[in-house]
């Protein structure tokens, strides 16, 4: 009868006991899927949810941000008024944003050609450019009601709902990246397996690669949470080296069985 390992036991073996990977390889698909799902949720929470939630909480919540920290604005009869002028140019990333409601209308000809992504906001319209196309939106068409900071602040729950949907999207993106990297690691490990004449299928090696990424994924998530560019770069290198090392030790153990 095959051994049934709980989440914690799977995690300990996956991260610290590569010589015991045969036990992980023998787990049913449901148990492996449950472990990977839990790991990806944890990675998403550490990498994205905690930093963003901390920033929002530190500023007093979305309602406080809108009413007290955002520039005062009003939108009446399709005319936007914002206190002050805001301009942000990031040539290194090809991004440019300009909010100037003293200007009645921007035209597509106002776009700086040196930037790949441009947002121009005037009293009556918005011009948005990306690498594919350039579009114009009129405030009358986008929002057909009067709006200001106080009124927008009362709809803070809508922004929280949007954040939840955004986090779900980030989870799916994280999962896609995790599975793709596992595929690359499995492909390399499968080549080594054939050289070592191991009787392992690609599916079995892929399952091992899914487990082998555990510690690297968590370390990388913590590095992103701390928002340190140096740690993020180092964690990526660490993750790759550790994952290869774990898979190599697991394959060597399979050879001895």
Image: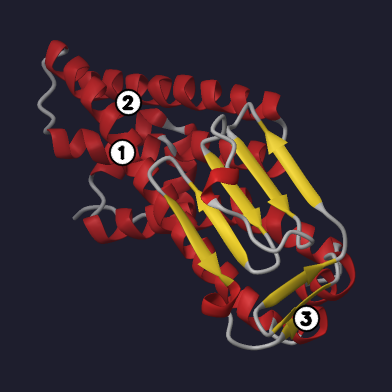
**In-front residue for pair 246/256:** 246
Residues at badges 3 and 1 in contact (C-beta under 8 Å)? no
On the image, the x and y values in percent for residue 53 come to 71, 62
Residue 221 lies, with reference to residue 75, above or below; the image says above
What number is the disc on residue 135?
A: none
Q: Which residue is mark 3?
A: 148
Image quadrant where residue 38 sits: bottom left
Q: From the viewer's perspective, tell me whether residue 20 is left or right of residue 75.
A: left
What number is the disc on residue 180?
A: 1
User: Callout 2: 10 Å neighbours few (<14), some, many (20+)?
Assistant: many
For image coordinates 74% across by 42% down, the residue present is 88
Instruction: Give the alpha-carbon distance from disc 2 to disc 3, as whole Å.
Output: 60 Å
On the image, the x and y values in percent for residue 31 come to 31, 58
Q: Which residue is mark 2?
A: 250
Residue 81 lies, with reference to residue 135, above or below; the image says below
* Sequence-wise first label, 2 or 1: 1
Q: From the viewer's perspective, tell me whether residue 146 is left or right of residue 30.
A: right
| Residue 28 in sight in this render | yes
Residue 41 lies, with reference to residue 203, above or below; the image says below
**In-front residue for pair 100/227:** 100
Badge nearest the viewer, 2 or 1: 1
Give the SS element for disc 3.
Answer: strand
* Sequence-wise first label, 3 or 1: 3
* Sequence-wise first label, 2 or 3: 3
């Amino acid at each position: 009868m095959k051994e049934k390992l709980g989440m914690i036991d799977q995690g300990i073996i996956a991260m610290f006991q590569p010589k015991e990977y045969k036990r992980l390889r023998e787990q049913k698909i449901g148990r492996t899927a449950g472990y990977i799902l839990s790991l990806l949720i944890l990675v998403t929470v550490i990498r994205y949810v905690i930093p963003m939630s901390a920033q929002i909480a530190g500023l007093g919540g979305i309602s406080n941000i809108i009413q007290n920290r955002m520039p005062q604005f009003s939108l009446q009869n399709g005319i936007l008024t914002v206190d002050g002028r805001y301009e942000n140019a990031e040539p290194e990333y090809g991004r440019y944003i300009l909010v100037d409601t003293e200007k009645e209308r921007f035209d597509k000809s106002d776009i700086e050609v040196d930037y790949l992504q441009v947002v121009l906001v005037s009293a009556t319209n918005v011009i948005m450019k990306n690498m594919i196309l350039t579009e114009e939106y009129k405030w009358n068409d986008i929002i057909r009601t009067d709006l200001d900071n106080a009124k927008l602040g009362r709809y803070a729950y809508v922004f929280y709902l949007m954040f939840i949907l955004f986090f779900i999207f980030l989870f799916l993106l994280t999962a896609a990246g995790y599975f793709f990297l596992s595929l690359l690691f499995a492909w390399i490990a499968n080549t080594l397996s054939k050289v070592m004449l191991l009787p392992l299928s690609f599916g079995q090696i892929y399952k091992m690669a899914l487990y082998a990424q555990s510690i690297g994924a968590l370390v990388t998530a913590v590095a992103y949470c701390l928002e340190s560019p140096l740690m993020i770069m180092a964690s990526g290198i660490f993750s790759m080296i550790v994952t290869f090392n774990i898979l190599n030790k697991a394959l060597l153990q399979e050879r001895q069985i």
